[in-house]
Image (cartoon, grey):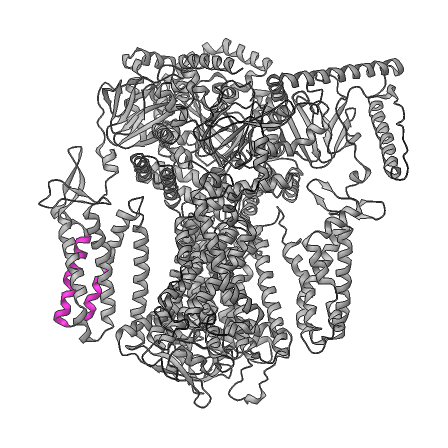
Amino acid sequence: MNEVAFEKKEDDGEDDENIDSNIEWSNLIFLPFHSGFKLMVLFSVLIKSVLGPIQSVYPIVYCLDVMDQNMCLSFVKYFYWYCCDTIYGVDTFLHIVHRQVTEKAMRREYLPKSAFYLLLDIVSLIPFYRLVEENICPPTAIWPNILAFTEFVVIYRVVDHFSLESTHSFWHIVIGFTLLLASCLNCITCFWLLLTKYGLCKSCSGSNIYYDWRHYIFHKLNETDENYTNYVYSSAYVLSFAINRSFDETKPSTIWEFYMICFLMICGYVFTLFVVLPKLFAEAILTLCRIFTNYPHVQRIVQDTRRRNSSVTANVRVENFYKLIWKKRSGVIYLPEVMAELPRYLRLDICQDLVWPVFYHSPTLRKTTIPFKRWICDFMKLDYKLPGENFFTGPHCYTNIYYIKSGIVQLMSEDDGVTPVLSVTGGTVFGDINFFISPTDRKVVVRCLTYCEVFSVSRYHMIRGMHKFPGDRRIILESAQNRIEHAKALYRCKQDVKGLNRAEVEGISWIKKRWWQISEVISNWKKTFRKERYKYEIPPEETNYHCAKYIGQLVLCRDAQLQTKSIFANVNFPWIFAPNSSFVTIWRKIVILTVSLVLMLYPPHITSLSIPMPFRFFQFWTDLVYTGDICVSLLTSLQNQDNIRESFASVVFARCKTLYFFLDVLSTIWIENLVLLFGMPDLYYLVQFNRLIKIYILFTGELVRWDIRNNPMHIVGYKIIIINFSAVYIMSYVFYMLSTRIPGITFSHFFGKKHCGLDIPKSQCAERIEEKIDIAIAWTFERMFLEYFPRKLIDIYLSMISLYTSFMVYMFCKTLLIAAIYLQFRGIVNYKYFVTNLKKYYKYYNIHPDLLRRLNRYLNCHWKYYHGADVMNPDFLKNEPFDIFWKVQGEVAEKILSQSKAFAGAHPGLIRELAYYAKFLILPKNSAIVLFGVQIKNASWIVKGHIKCEFHSENGELLKTYHKPGQLLSMSSVFLKNVSLRTYIACTDCEILYIKLQDFHKILKRYPTEWTYFKNCIDEFSPGFDKIYQSYLKKHRDYQKKLRERIFHSRMSLIAPITKEPMSSPVTPTIYNVDAWPAPDFQFLEFWMLFRATIVFVSIAAAALQGGSGVLYRWPLILTCAFCDCIAWTDIIIKLSLPYYDEKGILIYDKLKCVKHYLSRGFLLDIIGVLPWFQIAGSLLENETDENDAMLINTMCRFAHLYILFGYFDYLGDKPNINSAFITIVKWQVILVLVMLGGSHFLMSYCVAFTFDANSRFELLDIKRRGTCWMPAFFKLSRNITVEQLHLVYIESLSLVQCGFTRMNFGRFIINRVYIGVGTSLLFLALLHWYVMCYSLALLISNSRGHTMFQNGVRQLERFLEAERVDKNLIYKTVRHFRYWWIRTKGINIHYLTNERIGVVFRQDLSYYFLKRTLVALNSILQGGESLERQLASASTQIYFLPNEMIVREMDLNSSIYVVHRGKVVISQGGKKITTLTKGCIFGQLTDDVSRPIKISASAESHADLLQISNKQFQDFITDEVRDTISNNPQSKDDFIATSKNVTDNPYDTVQYILRGRKSIKLPWMAKPMEAHHSSWYVKWLYLAWVVAPTTSVAMVLILDTLPQNFIGKHIWGLILSDLVYFANFIAEFYTMELQVVQNKCVKRKIGFGVFRTWGFYIDATTLVLPLLTLVSNNWNYQLIRFLRLRQFYYFHNSFCRSFKSKAAPMILKTTIVLLLFHAMTCGWIHVACRGCARVTKNYKPERFKMPSFVVPKDWHNDYIIALTFILLIHTRTTYDAVIALSPSQVLYKVIINYFIFIIDMWLISVAMGATYTKFRELYQYDYNVGNLITCLQHRGLSPTLLESVKEYTKQLWRRQRGNWLPELAGQAPVCLREDLMEALYMHHLTAPPLFQKLPQYFRRQLVSRLQRIVIFPGKCIVQEGDIHSCIYFIHEGEVEKRYVDKKGESKMLSLLSANGYFGLIPGMFPNVSFSFSYYSRTVVDLVFLKFNDWQDLLEGYPDIKHELYTAATQLKSEVK
């Protein structure tokens, strides 16, 4: 049967109609998925999650009438009473029902709700609080009020409703995130208030005096209801920890509050770290990825075109093409690969919708049937043509049909090739008949006038389609025949009338004339048909001028289309402007300039009391431009895909529908006049802010539209600047206007006050701000460095809004910049990661040092020219249009090949085809290209550089010649397919052009003339050359060995020296033959650069220290600066004559050019940094420069030398094997240290004035405090500052600089509003630190690679197999295999990494070095010589197998040959063991070229490493002699050959030795050693000994050091226990086992006394013995030696944190390190600050100073939590002065730990963002591919309905199966393992069809591995009746309707197919048979399908099975008919 049904047939559709007419109440189960009901549920969730927790504190719903006073709150109250639980209960109930009715649910595409979420829903619906508490208005208590929080658990519905995990909508993210945060804050606030009501201390409850946090707001509680005020202030207090910004002076006062704020700070930090930053970072990556991917790709293409192509305009044309592609197609040229993952029905619908114009306009294809169109549309391709390119010429006019989709094409006369005969546009078809009958005499050339998009379909696919569809073949051929006959008649008519001597132009002229005649008739008819019924007759044809040679369809261009530079798209009134005309461009610039001025001028002027007259003129200009812009927009045509709207009505209608038009109107209308009319003059100026709505064009217009020629980093920088500036600038003036018009707002809280000096009376300090620009400055300073607290509730409201908005803007800009930097350096980091892995791999297997040097040479060469892009993306032109490919390298390759002597006079087509297959390759100097005696693999030509050729003369003399660009290397060897008799070595860096010899000869065979000539030459000269080759090779065999040795060791000393280089050889100048300084790469300069960078650091630091405490040591510092200046002058002299490399890489030695080069680069900065500018200024100016100013100028000038530091670090990182990320981070840390020192000097100049002796500038006389000092008010500084106070001020200046870094005022510093230098400098420091933070984070994230991606892939595969209920043993086996694969390879696919870009010869040497021993053993069997060994080495791939793992199975087809490299392999046949293979043995299909079943089974006896070589490559490598050797071996009949003698493995190269390292132990009572497996007790012991014990020991030492002596004895037990554990582990080390080589065997031996040879033993002994001295000396410092025990972390990391040994181990280790660091810093603060830390409780004002008072805790536990609070405040950047540093030592400690905390914070953020992004990487990668697909389809003009279908399908697909079924990692599994997985998943489907039931098990096992899987949603057509689609479908899950069309043309359902059914059996086996029925998905259907082409190799490999199968299939086919 063709298909199987599991339900009875239905007669007709009448019953269905009756059923459908009734209401199906069962559809109510889908009510929860209705959008309207979901909104009601969301509203209910928000009310429940808010009012539920509030009820626990304030019973406002049931006991109070507060909510009844407001209509909205009253509605919320009664909705909560009567509707919330009802609506949510119905939703929960229906979800439960939906889980049970799975069949009905499957039809609606909805997934059942998780049981855990249903449990939360039920918990929220049960009124636990009311059930426990009988009193409706109970008193406030922890219990049972805490039960009211159960209603909050449904907050997950907010995340689900807005899809916060997967959505990419900006507004969904913002709104959903805000609602979620508000609900969570409400819950935490209520819990905080509940604890407050209960009492946070003994005296905090039951008293009118507040001792807790309410003490700070006690004076504000009388503004309104006290409970409400407490709620508002506590909400702001809790919110401050989420956004790290304080709102008021609220601080913790009790110990429990300190515990709570520590918890809140950690929660807020984790929330930002793991939720906000990763999500926004991923969204920014998704937004910018396409831009940052296209930019380097296009730049490389343009640069290669400029470098290679000799045409001056070639690179410009390529660049213009990509610019246009980005504008028209957003950079997506072709349909992404994700298109292939869509189901067939959707792909066909898309293809049909995209190519329907081809069928509509083509007379040949117009009448074909729908199945034929559906089939042929899959093969239509879209190509892009550049202006001036020809097509439909040459052979292309014989093989393709072309359809012009867009653009203008001209038909040019062949007489001169310039004169345009006709211009046609989109809709034109070329080759409609020429496709079948090729024209022999063409008179025109088709050339693109503009950029064109052309559909094409090849003749091959058309003929295939006509063969498959006979009815359509008849239609097409009849139509073609009729049109040809008609054309012949017309041509004969032309001959009779005009003769044969008339030009072809006559026919074209007739077409043009006839076209306009008909067009005029049609246009007249359109104008008059509404008024009267008038018939127009078409003028008769003038057949004598008919063009008979063109048969197709033309769409002529209008004049407006040809006038591409016209400003009008429609020249008739009303005129319509062209969208890209010069007028529109200029107008847009005018509008942008005006809007920019509006943004700058409007806010300050409309908020001022008096408006100047110039601004009133500007207002008039603004209104005029705004109004004009609306008019221009209505008169500017819209470009939709390829069409331009030209009708005035259509343009206006389309424009009015856009959001931008609405914003334009809203920003233009004069709302202020309407306000006056309605009698509200107070709002006159406020409503004028509507003009600022127009600033949207600054974010969406020309300024942010990326151009392919611009660096996208500039656009990102502009966006960040304009977003921050607009937000701060507009908010500042809005709040200023509100503060001036609303009396209750505290002005100083938002804008601060003007601070006065001590000498200025306070009455003279005005509160209001007079200068307009000062408003924004004051707002910025007060928001960043909060000094004045709110006084009223309205201040809190506005502060929460402004700070939350600022937080979101800050996070958005931060993640945007991080993502941009990450994407910018991703390519470079990827290449460095590739180099690191490659070298790590070879070092792991002990690569030879000489090979490593050669490897470095290759890697450095590719880094030098392409930064590794050539290696990482070798086929970068693969998906580019052909014209682009030809411009980049095709033309250059064609030129080189045509000029080569070997192809002189060759056919141009041959040259072009060879050029198409040719590739370019960069090779480093001294690299071997072709070696003597080695088989040639490529035909190579020199493109750039010089190559040295070595060969022997007849006399045996070694000669050398040099080859120039354009020459073919080893010509005779290339043509004769023989080994090379010459050696070719690059004597400079070279670029070569190469073609694989296989491709070369295949192409040559396609050209009979050249092939015949070539074949005759081979037949004639080959025998003679063979003799010459053999004799020559024998004669110089010694030279071959020496050459191999020389190349291997990379030595050029064996090359015979010559006295004079030929002219073609490049001559490199050296320091010995030119009068110049050493070259830039001279070794001395490397040391000089390091020395110079050190001097720069010392110079800046020495100058900066003089402005602070270093002034006391001014004389030594001045001497240091003077020494540094001398070095700087020396550096200037060196640079004046230093040679340099120009843009072409040429080393320039000319002195004059060197001087000019230096003067134009860093000379000015060097001079600025070295000259004494303060002395020069003093001599030029009349007033003498103050000494304080002179020191500051000196410090600032020395910062000009920072570029030297930048250059040195960049030089260090500019190497492929160097991790530039960490070098860059170190660079920025050094810069920050210098900036911190310089910033402190600048701040000290505002606070301190030094007075020096007039005679001696170095003697300090006095130190005075300035009036502008920024020191906190609670520090009493005298007018004359003492030395101790100087140190305090200097350290505080460093602390203030760090506050500027972190954008907070942590320490109550006074940020002056009068002298804004301090605030401005802090703002600059904040911006610098923010950039450094983002830059460092981006580099750290890009470097946070490892096994996480691979590990996630393994986990994904494991989860998938578990979900499919695969056998647990198979899952374990699969996961174990991949874990082992990671252990052996570390995730490195070495065969992929060493691609052809590395070099053919070098790849052979690398592989041969490691595999030589195995291949020599194999050669003892094959007798193929060293040449065969090297070829096999280069083609082999290492694969790894666990013990007892199957390699191949008997009777399976296997396309690979296997060689045993390590371990042993068991060969069996018929279930019986035959033999065991060792090193060098080979098995697989050895004797036949045609694929056949293998005769044996092979499995790994132990851990085995095999070399895998494809059978095709193996057969190509071996010679006839080797084939004879194989066939003569009797073992080859069983598909294996064993070596005659077992080859002894090198014990250091065995698998056992390679896998060494696992910790094992054998205690005296153990019979055998125990390894540290994850399930053994030994692992738990190592966790205890390596992590718990050292951590406990160090933590106890730190905390006990801070405790009094009497406390230590009580807590010493912790140290004793840790010592016991550590001592036990110390003893256990004697019993640990290690793998040793004894008598060439690997054996495990006990270490025993061997531990004495390790340094770790003595460290452990010291940490055990030395602490005992504390008992003798009573000195606790001896305990600090325990810190050395932390070295056990390294052992723990090596043993458990690598690979997959433990998922939790890396997390445990990282968490332990972080906690230990925080514990150490906390204990350090206790030690430094005090024993009994002071914490701020309240403020009082003695005299003029605002001083804090302190309370000292008595318990050390309280001491610790307060110290921890201080550390967390610094780490989380929370601006609360809960703990203050008062002494210099405390401030210095704060400065030091703040610097280290910054590094820790940066590392934590990078780890969190990297881990979170890696977890969701699959989602964003899938969405990126889908986004590219949707963008491409949208730009191609896909219908909105289909576009929405694609979006919905991909969205549903991700929800159901995460975008794909079987994970990609399963494809990397070995063949047998992959077959086992597929057999477990889908084998039951192959047993359903009777045809497959009788197939052998081995055949079905292989067949099941060819199955694929896809999901179809309900109501979709899987296959349509009449379709030819060779595919068999198996229903894995769901239901499918089988339908047919009756005689009336109505669709009827015949049967219903359910799970385990199948259909398409006959069409799937017979490729030309169409489907007889249509199949529609009734429910969500998981289909497993088998394509016809995917299993043809199996049928060919098993001819008997094929015969039996098709015999039965033919019989079934006849029965079905």
Q: Nearer the viewer, residue 530 or 233?
A: 530
Of residue 974 and residue 1571, the one placed in the foreground of this image is 1571
Relative to 188, is 2003 above or below? above
**Would residue 1678 be counted in the magenta stretch?**
yes
Residue 889 sits inside the magenta stretch: no
The quarter of the picture where the C terminus appears is top right
Q: In the rendered image, which quarter is residue 1216 located in? A: top left
74 sits to left or right of 137: right
User: Residue at (60%, 61%) from the top-left corner?
Assistant: 722
Residue 1680 location (% of width, % of height): 22, 65
The answer to whether any part of residue 1928 appears in the image is yes
Magenta-drawn stretch, dominant element (helix, strand or loop): helix
Q: Nearer the viewer, residue 861 or 983?
A: 861
Q: Position of residue 370 (x, y in %)?
A: 64, 25
Residue 442 image point, x, y percent: 75, 20
> Looking at the image, can residue 1128 be seen?
no
What stretch of residues is rendered in magenta?
1655-1683
Place of residue 1105 in the rendered image (x, y in percent of width and height, measured from the top left): 42, 72
Q: Could you say which quadrant of the image residue 2008 lies in?
A: top left
Residue 726 horizontal side relative to residue 666, left or right:
left
Q: How many marks?
A: 0
Q: Quadrant of residue 152?
A: bottom left
Q: Residue at x 67, y 57 (%)?
A: 697
Tell me: residue 137, above or below residue 299.
below
Q: Is residue 1851 left or right of residue 1085?
A: right
